[in-house]
Amino acid sequence: MHILLVADAFNSLTQRVHAELRDRGHTVAVELALPGRSLPEAVRRHAPQLVLAPMLRTAIPREVWSAYTCLIVHPGPVGDRGPSSLDWAIHEGADRWGVTVLQAEEEMDAGDVWASVACPLPPVGKSDLYRNEIADAALAAVLLAVDRFVSGTHVPLRQQPSDGNGPAAAVPAAGVLPASTTGVLPASAAGLFPAAEAEAVPASAAAALSGLPAAMVVPPRTRPYLDQSVRRIDWCADDTSTVVRKLRAADSRPGVLDVLLGGEWYLHGGHPEEGLRGRPGELLATRAGALCRATKDGAVWIPEVRPRRRPGGPRTFRLPATLALGDRLPALPEVPAPPLSYPRAHHGTWTDIRYREDGETGFLSFSFPGGAMSTGQCRRLLAAYREVCERPTTVLLLGGRRDFFSNGIHLNVIEAAADPAAESWANINAIDDLVEAVLGTTDRLVVAAVAGNAAAGGVMLALAADEVWCRSGAVLNPHYRLMGLYGSEYWTYTLPRRVGSATAERIMSEALPMSAVGARRVGLVDRVVECAPEDFPARVGALATRLASLRGTGARIVAKKAEAERRRSVAPLAGFRERELARMRKTFEDPDAPYHALRRAFVRKDGPLRS
């Protein structure tokens, strides 16, 4: 079937839907809802059989939805309406939520329901939830809705008006079905996700749904935009859990507006700190670019901040807190994270790099905001990698516990640098050093555990490992072209080695997102782990421990070393790096190279000029 995706941006969810639908044999086009462009005209040009909007903040015009079936993905359960659905859920401490696919009509979020899937809301940031639990539920709902549309026989459920009297109702168009008094419609009765059809949803989409009600409803209400008057932190009155919840509900956008050192700043991200104390609102310490600020009963670490935009000024962007604040910061102690060799000391505090061991298996995890890795972050991770390689382990698992693996170099830090070309060069060399260290590890097996999305140099970092294990919900973008770069991170060595020269060339030229299953199909990934985001660390941990215990693992390590020596005697690794960096340096040093304008637009969130 020919499906048109309409979205504000080609964001992570739109990419995942695009990749998964293509995996299932559909032809998929993308049209961005850009200012000044006619959406009705674009839809007519594509002539789709179905229009699907994974992420759209504006209403689809009547001219479109009256002529085409248009399905909207709403990040909330049946009955929930409004532009800040997930924000409100996190802000109010919900531990369970849902995603609904509904048909576009005059009133936003009030159309007939084609599918709805519930999901847990663990205590993490909004963007993390959106890319993981929400995305899993959204994909399950989208696949079910598409299958129902293809059948030609399904009758979607009509939502009753939002009158505020009692629980929400979603009923078949032909009759009225009362909602459950528990607020959850029985799946078999409501028809949102009938038990008989649950097995039709592919395991990769349904893996996170085991044991959960298939559909969730809430009292019908249209909630307003969650503005800064509600998000505001009262440092004297709000306890740590409240502060963290407010920060997490706004972690990527819009941030929480606050007064800091005499200026207005948006705070992005928050992690509780149990050890440090001070007067409420006081700045206490720094760590790895983050800022620690006291609450009334503890403290929080704030990784990133963004200055408020001045009237008529350019859009501002997030940066590591200490870098953004610069000379405004008073003299604060840099409190390092506990040593990697004492993992128990990491409890109750925040650090972006952690390590633990289980027998002969080491686990080096890292988590950087947005998946970007600055020069300093690459160097710290490299130092940690070298340190843990001194440990007597047989298998080393490298990766995050959840969410992003890596997206490569840190474009925001580069954009903020006095000399972006020089910082680009420093950053690409720092990540190359890290990749080189992984490639040069011959005394143990290294497994890249890709819990979430990865792109560009982040994918190539994973490919440097002996095996790549990827969660089923991850989206990979193993290319550089859309940022105007040739790329480095030894991709000219690792990518053809895995997928062959022809496939490597196609991946780079097409520059399309890939699902985990699609990546495994071409050889980019060795294992797809079908599980919920929260279960990924335990699942890959058990697999890694088993790998370390296998009788043949020692022989694999010996063979790995011999093969590495043979390959490098034929084509030394240094040659791949030199050739890649020569292309990159030429781009960095050319002020007219498209990379600079593309980077600037990406960082400052300037919309694309075309789909």
Image: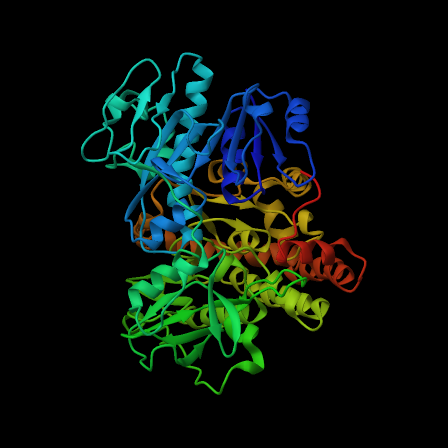
Q: Is residue 344 above or below residue 559?
A: below
Question: Along the horizontal axis of the image, is 336 left or right of 508?
Answer: left
Q: Is residue 351 above or below residue 456?
A: below
Q: Is residue 395 visible?
A: no
**Quarter occupied by residue 499:** top right
Position in image of residue 481 (x %, y %): 69, 47
Quarter of the figure that contains the N terminus? top right
Q: Residue at x 80, y 62 (%)?
A: 591
Position in image of residue 39 (x %, y %): 64, 31
Position in image of residue 485 (x %, y %): 70, 53
Position in image of residue 521 (x %, y %): 51, 35
Quarter of the figure that contains the C terminus? top right
Q: Residue at x 67, y 54 (%)?
A: 601
Question: Along the horizontal axis of the image, is 1 left or right of 608?
Answer: left
Please, which colouring scheme is shown? rainbow
Question: Along the horizontal axis of the image, is 430 left or right of 207?
Answer: right
Q: Nearer the viewer, residue 387 or 188?
A: 188
